Amino acid sequence: MKFISKILVETSPKTPERDAEYWSRVKDQAESCNPNSANADSATCGNCNYYINPGSTCSVVKRGETATPSLGNYICRDLSCDYEGQTYAHGERWCAGVDGVSEIIAGETANTDSSTENLPGSEYTRLSCYNGEVIA
């Protein structure tokens, strides 16, 4: 699905007295900064795009975040999620299992890593990435 719209994106404060064009002209999408990017965590471009993978949304900067805007208090927040060392895109779903328990011992060459076994009674949970958070 592709959305084409006219957008106006600026991060600096504008007043009608000194920036008349800002208030009277809507820029075409191609004129805005990085129109084909989500601009997640960009310090200079506030043109967020929810629909481009991985997606971003406008958010107030929170203390301790690594990305800070060059001007203002808002940034395009990345919507992807990190789970056990892997990054998932906004809207992506996956299954997470509980490690099996293996009592099989076959000498010194036995596989003692129970995470590779899918034993009877193993349970799985469907997880999803939504707005930067892992949801069970």
Image: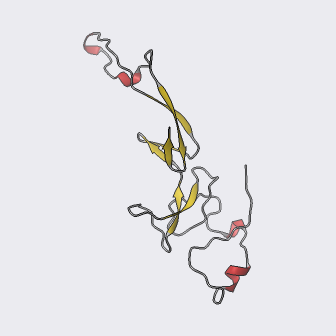
Instruction: From the top left corner, tell me how far across and down residue 93 is, in percent.
Output: 56, 37
Instruction: From the top left corner, tell me how far across and down residue 68 is, in percent.
Output: 45, 66
Q: Is residue 123 above or below residue 52?
A: above
Residue drawn at point x = 29 percent, y = 11 percent: 105
Residue 31 found in image quarter: bottom right
Please, which residue is most extreme toward the top here?
Answer: 106
| Colouring mode (rainbow / by chain / secondary structure / one colour) | secondary structure
Q: Is residue 2 above or below residue 47?
A: above
Residue drawn at point x = 53 percent, y = 34 percent: 94
Please, which residue is most extreme toward the front here?
Answer: 136
Residue 99 found in image quarter: top left
Instruction: From the top left corner, tell me how far across and down residue 58 is, in percent.
Output: 56, 62
Please, which residue is most extreme toward the bottom here?
Answer: 17
Please give the count of numbered marks on the rendered protein: 0
Residue 13 found in image quarter: bottom right
Residue drawn at point x = 32 percent, y = 12 percent: 104
79 vs 21, left or right, is left
Instruction: From the top left corner, tell me how far across and down residue 96 is, in percent.
Output: 47, 31
Please, which residue is most extreme toward the left here?
Answer: 108
Residue drawn at point x = 25 percent, y = 14 percent: 108
